[in-house]
Amino acid sequence: MQVIKLMLEMTQTPHWLKTWGSPVGELQNLPKWRRFVLTLAGFFGLLTGLCVVFLLLVTAALAWEDHAHAQWPEATEQVQRCSLDLYPPDPKYYRIDCGVNYTVRGEEILSHVYSRTTPDPSRIIWEYSSPQLGRLQEWVDAHPKGTRMVVHYDPANHKKAVLIVTDMPLGGTQIPGCLRLLEVAAASCVVLLAIARILMPRPIATH
């Protein structure tokens, strides 16, 4: 909230500008390097501020979704097959695909749970994905057929299952990753807007 308040305050016309006239003349008197840095700091400060608002909305939506999933019935599933496969919509990425089965009211259900994707290092060499891919493969190797895991399934569609608490790399909730991005964006926003405020021209006092 402090970041958003600072953003709103920075976008308003400062009191001294209302008192002493248009800021254009004051800005023109600044050295070129200072005007350039002020413009960049102000622009990117507001841009990162918008990112903060967006990430807050995304995090809130994910928290609501996780809460809803946590209310779904719980089942202990048995892994049929776990593998590290190419992501069908985009073959430049890999993900874990686990075929699992569990019983709901006497009916045996076959479903799948997935991790999020990671780039294929042989196709996207500029992304630091090799260690992540190795972690996913290690997890797959540690979960052979017959391994048991706890899932939550949709009461309206028993074949839809999700992992709420899991050690699967890139699996489960996405909130920790969003919070890390939010912290970086918020800190960047505060620093950039503070720089912009410091560089703003000061009013010339008259007597």
Image: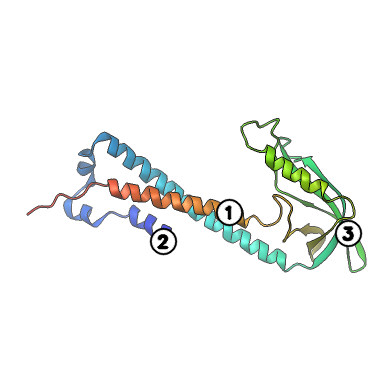
Query: Which residue corresponds to mark 3?
Result: 109
Look at 77% across and 45% down and name the residue there. Answer: 138
Circle 3 crowding by C-alpha within 10 Å: few under 14, some 14–19, many from 20: some
Question: Contact, CB < 8 Å: mark 2 with mark 1?
Answer: no
Image disc number at residue 2: 2
* Amino acid residing under circle 2: Gln
Is 91 located above or below residue 98 in the figure?
A: above
In the picture, the quarter occupied by the N terminus is: bottom left
Residue toward you, 16 or 3: 3
**What residue sits right under mark 1 in the picture?**
178
x 80%, y 62%: residue: 150
The image quadrant of residue 133 is top right
Q: Nearer the viewer, residue 83 or 56?
A: 83
Determine the secondary structure under disc 1: helix
Q: Relative to residue 196, is residue 105 depicted above or below? A: below
- Image-based side of 10 in relation to 77, left or right: left
